[in-house]
């Protein structure tokens, strides 16, 4: 997550604060399926950051993380 956030810092900062919600029904990460991937990205004067990240992993594991 940290490397992804650092990658976002290379984008220009918008003139107004922005919050973007992303949702992906299914994705593959390291060969394992992830379902219901959701996250919130925020941009303010200090740069870009992740607010939350949620997903369902194999074995009915649900992960929720404030970033």
Image: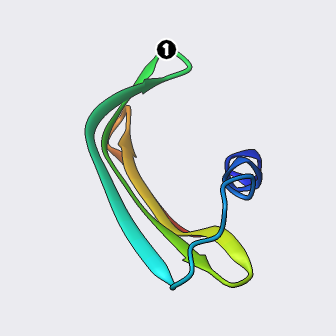
Quadrant of res 49: bottom right
Q: Residue at x 49, y 14 (%)?
A: 31
Q: Residue at x 66, y 54 (%)?
A: 11
Q: Is residue 11 visible?
A: yes
Which residue is nearer to you in this view: 14 or 53? 14
Q: From this viewpoint, which residue is outermost toward the front?
A: 15
User: In the image, residue 58 lies at what x, y percent?
Assistant: 38, 32
Which residue is nearer to you in this view: 8 or 1? 8
Q: Residue at x 67, y 47 (%)?
A: 4
Q: Which residue is mark 1?
A: 31
Q: Residue at x 39, y 67 (%)?
A: 20
Q: Is residue 62 left or right of residue 1?
A: left
Q: From this viewpoint, which residue is outermost toward the left?
A: 25
The coloring applied to the image is rainbow
User: In the image, residue 21 lies at what x, y percent?
Assistant: 34, 64
User: In the image, residue 62 lies at what x, y percent?
Assistant: 38, 53
User: In the image, residue 41 lies at what x, y percent?
Assistant: 49, 66
Q: Is residue 2 left or right of residue 14?
A: right
Q: Vertically, is 8 above or below 47?
A: above
Q: Is residue 63 left or right of residue 22?
A: right
Q: Vertically, is 52 above or below 33?
A: below
Helix, strand or loop under label 1 = loop
């Amino acid at each position: 997550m940290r490397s992804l956030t650092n990658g976002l810092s290379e984008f220009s900062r918008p003139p107004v604060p922005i919050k973007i919600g992303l949702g992906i029904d299914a994705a593959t990460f390291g060969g394992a399926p992830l379902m219901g991937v959701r996250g919130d990205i925020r941009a303010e004067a200090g740069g870009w950051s992740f607010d939350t990240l949620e997903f369902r992993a194999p074995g009915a594991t649900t992960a929720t993380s404030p970033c």
